[in-house]
Image (cartoon, helix red, strand yellow):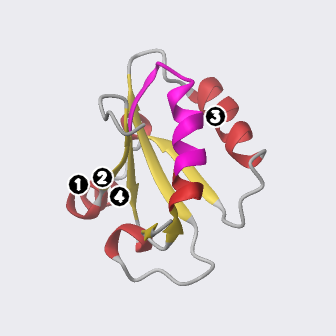
Amino acid sequence: MGERFGLKEATIHKICEVFARYPQVHRAILYGSRAKGNYREGSDIDLVLIGNDDLNDRLLARIDMEIDDLLLPYMVDLSILSHITDPDVIDHIRRVGVVFYSRDDDRQ
């Protein structure tokens, strides 16, 4: 298996399987160093979720717990795009963000 974003395909698949269990999650966008390609071995995985109105902080906490239960050797930082208020962060996500998971993607 290959790698994308400095992550093994198996790791990406495990995270995407968690997202797939939640119909409220439509997409996950990877941003930060892994999206830009200047990550290091221990870099965290920055993901912002896009979904319907039922995607809230409580659901985010459940998703975060499931990802934590995967015992990955990375820190995964999850947020909801509609909850981000810092315009610089939103701009960064729009500039460097890449689709990590999409409900419409047949590969999931």
Of labels 1 and 2, the one closer to you: 1
Left or right: 49 as drawn, with respect to 15: left
Tell me which numbered mark, 3 or 1, is placed earlier along the sequence.
Answer: 3
Query: How much space separates mark 4 and mark 1, taking CA atoms?
Result: 9 Å
Mark 2: amino acid: Ile
Q: Can you identify the residue that label 4 sits on?
A: 89
* Badge 2 vs badge 4, beta-carbon distance below 8 Å: yes
Residue that sits furthest to the front in the current view = 1
* Neighbourhood count class around disc 1 (C-alpha, 10 Å): few under 14, some 14–19, many 20 upward: few
**Residue located farthest toward the left when viewing the structure as drawn:** 95
Q: Nearer the viewer, residue 2 or 86?
A: 2
The three-letter code of the residue at mark 1 reads Arg
The magenta region covers 13-27
Residue 63 location, x and y as percent?
Answer: 64, 34
**Residue highlighted by disc 1:** 94
Task: Name the residue beneath numbered marker 3.
Answer: 63
Q: CA distance from mark 3 to mark 1?
A: 23 Å
Residue bearing mark 2: 90
Q: Amino acid at mark 4?
A: Val
Mark 3 vs mark 1: in front: 3
Q: Residue at x 68, y 44 (%)?
A: 67
> Quick one: label 3 or label 2, which is nearer the N terminus?
3
Q: CA distance from mark 1 to mark 2?
A: 6 Å
Q: CA distance from mark 2 to mark 4?
A: 4 Å
Q: In terms of secondary structure, where does tag 2 sit? A: helix
Circle nearer the viewer, 4 or 1: 1
| In contact (CB < 8 Å): disc 1 and disc 2 | yes
Of the image marks 4 and 3, the number of the one nearer the N terminus: 3
Query: Any magenta on residue 17?
Result: yes
Q: Residue at x 56, y 37 (%)?
A: 17
**Residue 36, percent from left and from top:** 33, 74
